[in-house]
Image (cartoon, grey):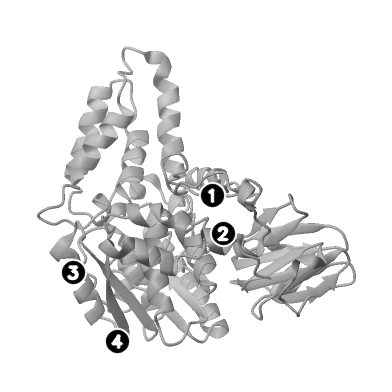
Amino acid sequence: MRFFLCRDRSKFIKSQDIKQYGDWYFIHEDDVKVYEDNDHLVLYCGYLIEGDIIEACKNFSFDNENGNFFAIKLTKDTHKISLDYFQNHKIFVADKYGIEISNYLPYMTIKEEDITNTTALDGTKLKYEREFDADETFYDHIKSFIPPYDYLQDARDAYEQEIWDSEELTEYIHECMKSHADVIKAKYPLRYCSLSEGIDSCTQSLFFYNDLQLLYDISPCDAGAVHLRCIKETQERFPNTHHYTWHTEENREECIKYLTDSSCRWQSILPTCKQVLSQDKQPDIIMYGVNGNEMFVRDFIPHMLLLCLTYYEHDTIKMKEKLHAEIDSKRSHYGVTYSLPSDGNWITTDTYVTAFMRKYFKEHIKEKPYLWKEKQKTFEEGFLMLTTPKLYTRVISNNNNIMCASIYNDRRIFHEVLKMKNHYLISDIMNSPIQRSIINKFEHEFTTPSNDVLAASYDTLYAATYDATHDRDLGQHI
């Protein structure tokens, strides 16, 4: 999917297949297509879930489209970039050595003096829970393109509506997922699915049941034996699987061997990148079940913030009592902790409740009533922020140079759970009732007791990022 675009032909010292359009010179791999009209040209890659991608090229309407794509419009002397809503791809831009646009950093002109930060991009300074406004690289003149979508406002607009009940929404989401899967099956014949023991990847993989399912475990892992048991049970329920173990003591070596993208912020995705590359044949697309947590408003912290909005009052003592009563009644729900439990795992519901209370109830509102509205706004902003998309798919697509998709990355369905009536949102939403209903349609048994976050040590992966990618970035590869 790689391409490079600039106005200086002399940068292409290796490639012979150079195309020209007006002032622009560019190269691209076969899966990047070219559309040319009377007054513009479009380099594009990917698919639309609905609509005609040629029409989108003709009108350059990509910002309004629903799908998985990138597109660059060229006139004779101008350009415009478009990314899909879920940013399933990265596009790098720079103008220090003339305008350069690419999705592969080693194609860009980079010199030693351009390096501004050699610490891991996921270090303290640059760590983002939500990544959609993070564009830094190791190089001061290169940024990743951030599309102009207003994710927070979209979430707010959805939350202010109440139009669905659970049965109607379940049927709608199921039909949308099926049609999305059908588009992918028609366009990409060879598909691999990243399958964990979690409900998000299980739901997605049921739409691609006979495709190769890639499972891995990490050693050591805080979830221990419980995690391994759930992985084994998951593997037994799919007919075509590949499993391996990622050993964290080899993190540095594995990072140096398999990390391509120096701007990566989610090095914990590297086991999947390695597992895909280790297969005998590379797929046309990788399915990775990101954004199920966000779409289904299922995780514990956003649920606590939602409860704060529901029970908000001046008397914080009464408010805390109501919050504790709610959580005590939901301790068995799937989303109530972020990690599978094990005997040696300190991550429990009480851990999160304690941390949450310390963060959001540091000051007594009764004694400082002027903070009342501000605190309510803080709860709402925090809740809505945690329902915006995460960008794992772009890490895999950029690092492996392969299309990567999620069945949850669909503008038709992503915000719809927020439009449920409020009494549904504070009931059993953390136990994933909609996904469980969809799973039941496949007559599939899902037994994993809680969220499938692999709590392990990734520090060496982050620390090795610069060493793994520095020489490649500085080389001349075009």
* In-front residue for pair 78/375: 78
Q: What residue is shown with label 3? A: 228
Residue 266 is situated, as x and y percent measured from the top left of the image, at 43, 56
* In-front residue for pair 137/54: 137
Give the mark nearer the N terminus: 2 vs 3: 2
Q: What residue is shown with label 1? A: 132
Amino acid type of the residue that numbered disc 2 sits on in the rendered structure:
Gln
Q: Is residue 43 left or right of residue 475?
A: right
Q: CA distance from mark 2 to mark 1?
A: 8 Å
Q: What residue is shown with label 2? A: 87
The numbered mark at residue 239 is 4
Give the mark nearer the N terminus: 4 vs 2: 2
Q: Would you identify the image quadrant in which residue 220 lies?
A: bottom left
Give the residue drawn at x 50%, y 61%: 469
Q: Would you identify the image quadrant in which residue 168 lies?
A: bottom left
Binning the other alpha carbons within 10 Å of mark 2 as few (below 14), some (14 to 19) or many (20 upward) gives many
Residue 240 is situated, as x and y percent measured from the top left of the image, at 32, 86
Q: CA distance from mark 2 to mark 3?
A: 32 Å
Q: CA distance from mark 4 to mark 3?
A: 18 Å
Give the residue drawn at x 41%, y 40%: 124
Tag 2 near tag 1, CB within 8 Å: yes
The numbered mark at residue 83 is none
Q: CA distance from mark 1 to mark 4?
A: 36 Å
Amino acid type of the residue that numbered disc 4 sits on in the rendered structure:
Pro
Binning the other alpha carbons within 10 Å of mark 4 as few (below 14), some (14 to 19) or many (20 upward) gives few
**What secondary structure is found at the residue carrying circle 3?**
helix
Instruction: Please say whether residue 88 is visible from this viewpoint.
Output: no
Q: Nearer the viewer, mark 1 or mark 4?
A: 1
